[in-house]
Image (cartoon, rainbow, N blue to C red):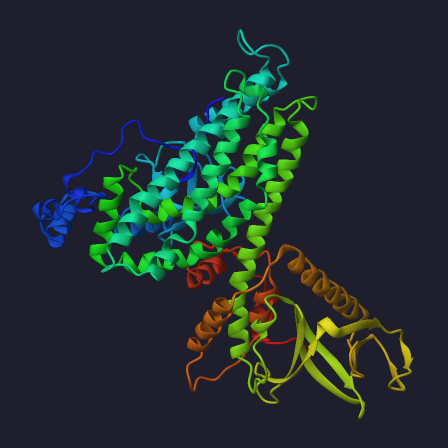
Amino acid sequence: MTSAPEVIGAMHQPKQTPPLSPVSAAVLPDGASDKAADELGSEDDLYEDLRGSGHRFGHPGGGGGEQLAINELISDGSVVFAEALWDHVTMDVQELGFKAGDVIEVVDATDKEWWWGRIMDSEGWFPASFVRLRVNQDEPMEEYLAHLGEIQALDEGQASLGSLSGPGLPCKEQMRTNVINEIMSTEQDYIKHLKDICEGYIKQCRKRTDMFTEDQLRTIFGNIEDIYRFQRKFLKTLEKRFNKEQPHLSEIGCCFLEYQTDFQIYSEYCNNHPNACVQLSKLMKVNKYVFFFEACRLLQRMIDISLDGFLLTPVQKICKYPLQLAELLKYTNPQHRDYKDVDAALNAMKNVARLINERKRRLENIEKIARWQSSIEDWEGEDVLSRSSELIFSGELTKLSQPQNKSQQRMFFLFDHQMIYCKKDLLRRDMLYYKGRLEMDHMEVIDLEDGREKDFNISVKNALKLRSLNTEEIHILCTKKPEQKARWLRAFADERRQVLHDRETGFSLTDLQKKQAMLNACKSHPAGKPKAVTRPYCDFLLRQKHPSLPTALPQQQVFMLAEPKRKTTFWHNIGRLTPFKK
């Protein structure tokens, strides 16, 4: 089995390392003398040399003219194909996974960084920097599809063999040997990749205090140095369990189980990665930063990929572990001493990836929640984010409270730990006024039967009761239909489960994250601008399966580019015209 190349070229090493350009010496290695620096000339000379050296920076797909030409071809009805340069491994259902050499039909190239493509019956987003356009776009696909069919048939034939694969090991053991060797080699290459980033970029950046602050470096590189230290320790453990003479006898499943908690270190990096892209994008608009980063790459003899491409690799790596373990389990006999550990390791790494994805989604949601709060008039008390980070459910309910038993129509928003209720404006039904909140940590939810309610001494239908465990506070909430009541009861149960899950996994927001989200929300609502919250926006907070670009993109691009991919219907359009259902 041929080892598949790793993402971003970390495992796809070129046959020759890029030649060291003379200008790369402008990034001084440790111990370089001031005299050497003087001989190199000024920074302006360095930038001028780099500008004329023919090196490309940033997006490998070329400039805006080429991108415009691609979109014109697509608009004219032409079929545009691109060939994958590297593997794109992903666990996101909205992304298109492929291997190096695959041919992809480009459906939408509107965005510079992420394109929408199709392979056979699969569609999704993929990084534009991972592919190159085919020179002859008119070449038919029959040859490629026939070749793909031959490869699939060969794989199926190998899987069905029970005899020997060559003069040595039985087929399954040979396949296990190949997978083990691939895991070890990709891990070693990944360590080198991390070392190149830490020593080739971070160390050089820290020398240039005139160009970078520590906060900037922390934003751009996140905790990648911590990841580097952890991965070295993990590799040493793998090497101890690796059987060099008979790789198929290696027992490496226990290594993943031993460090399954430590892998959660990737959560911080993945959560920070969108901020890194934004910060790096700002710096790359200034020529001296473009040339400085290129000089760093050349000095470290790294392959010709821009810095944002290198920084994406840890995100891809944590997603690839479950895929590698699944392949290893496939070729491990149930009688093998490593079988149970590999099976458990696969589940453990799936859980790690799932936890990282969930935390990333939650952190992306807090700015949406902050913007929602900033749209509410007459807000009182602490911010929603002071205790909550997830909108569980929302809808219109009839509220009855003691002692007057007054009936009020209110919009309720159920978050983890609390529920906010608001009043609609009489004229502008899309504008909401804050009216209060209920502390869900101290509330008991009671399903009421239709009929007379003893505490309020009134007849109720489709009702439920919220009773405080600490005070005599009681509220009755009524829905219009039994189905709506059942949905609210499930939502209250979901809220308790969410709180328990966060407590078990240790999820919480930092004060800095809360503060930054509220500051960003305030900027989005300048003074004097009317504030309103609409039903489509509330739906957006709750929607989980809406096609969206990978979160490496700035959020403002995500919303704009994702929307055209959603199929709209007549009723959906009507719903957008009516802010709230009545």
The x, y position of residue 568, in whole percent, is 56, 61
> Relative to residue 105, is residue 525 depicted above or below?
below
The x, y position of residue 238, in whole percent, is 52, 31
Residue ID at (35%, 31%)? 13
> Relative to residue 134, is residue 226 depicted above or below?
below
> Relative to residue 253, is residue 402 depicted above or below?
below
Give the residue at the far top of this rendering: 167
Query: Is 211 left, or right, of 184 in this rendering?
Result: left
Q: Quadrant of residue 443?
A: bottom right
Q: Is residue 483 visible?
A: yes
Residue ID at (57%, 83%)? 431
Residue ID at (90%, 87%)? 457
Give the residue at the far bottom of this rendering: 404
The x, y position of residue 355, in whole percent, is 59, 51
Query: Is 143 left, or right, of 369 in this rendering?
Result: left
The x, y position of residue 539, in whole percent, is 60, 67
Q: Quadrant of residue 445?
A: bottom right
Q: Is residue 64 visible?
A: no
Q: Between residue 115 and residue 420, name the one nearer to us.
A: 420
> Relative to residue 338, is residue 114 depicted above or below?
below
Residue ID at (81%, 70%)? 482
Quadrant containing the C terminus is bottom right
Query: Is 496 left, or right, of 167 in this rendering?
Result: right
